Image (spheres, rainbow, N blue to C red):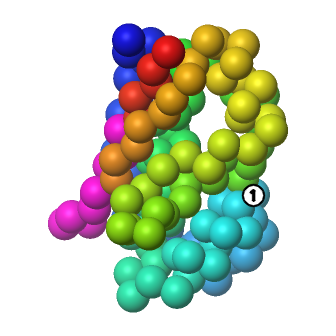
């Protein structure tokens, strides 16, 4: 059963300005996300999509002030190229508390915008 749905949209230009600001990027993105995005041809679009994903997760979990740093929430890519939520111990605790057993994630970017949708299931 679906317990939550979150969607967020982000302008790619917002991250074009910060591509050289490592301190800013490290506050928001995990080391794995940094490595992945910085190796993409359009790094800003990849960063924007992941930022939108983090916002969509917060909305799907219906938590206005998540007690986790954004860089703890990690979007990973499976072998077929599909994004998914990397579940670490801190996120696992939140999911357990909220009786959520599965998260679904979709990302897209086009025409200077990035969008993400997260669905939480029990």
One can see residue 89 in this view: yes
Q: Is residue 68 left or right of residue 13?
A: right
Vertical relation: 58 (above or below) 63: below
Front-most of residues 16 and 31: 31
Front-most of residues 22 and 120: 120
Front-most of residues 10 and 61: 61
Residue at x-position 52% and y-position 86%: 39
Helix, strand, or loop for circle 1? helix
Residue 111 among those drawn in magenta = yes
User: Within 10 Å of the Cα at label 1, are there few (<14), some (14-19), or many (20+) other Cα atoms?
Assistant: few
Q: Is residue 113 left or right of residue 56?
A: left
Classified by dominant secondary structure, the portion drawn in magenta counts as: strand
Rendering coords of residue 52 (x, y %): 45, 47
Vertical relation: 12 (above or below) 22: above
Tell me which corner region of the image, top left, top right, bottom left or bottom right, holds residue 32.
bottom right
Residue at x-position 39% and y-position 88%: 41
Residue at x-position 53% and y-position 75%: 37
Numbered range of the magenta stretch: 108-117
Rendering coords of residue 72 (x, y %): 74, 48
Residue sticking out furthest to the left: 111
One can see residue 8 in this view: no
Vertical relation: 39 (above or below) 49: below
Residue at x-position 73% and y-position 76%: 22
Q: Is residue 73 left or right of residue 2?
A: right
Give the residue number, with chain letter if any, for mark 1.
Answer: 27
Numbered label tally: 1
For the N terminus, the quadrant is top left
Residue 12 among those drawn in magenta = no
Vertical relation: 36 (above or below) 96: below
Rendering coords of residue 86 (x, y %): 62, 50
């Amino acid at each position: 059963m679906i317990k939550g749905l979150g969607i967020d949209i982000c302008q790619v230009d917002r991250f074009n300005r910060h591509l050289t600001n490592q301190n800013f990027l490290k506050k928001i993105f995990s080391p794995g996300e940094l490595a992945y995005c910085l190796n993409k041809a359009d790094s800003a679009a990849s960063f924007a999509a992941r930022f939108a994903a983090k916002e969509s997760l917060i909305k799907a979990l219906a938590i206005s002030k998540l007690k986790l740093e954004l860089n703890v929430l990690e979007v990973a890519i499976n072998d077929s190229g599909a994004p998914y939520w990397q579940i670490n111990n801190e996120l696992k605790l939140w999911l357990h508390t909220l009786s959520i057993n599965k998260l679904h994630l979709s990302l897209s970017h086009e025409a200077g915008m990035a969008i993400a949708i997260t669905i939480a299931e029990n």
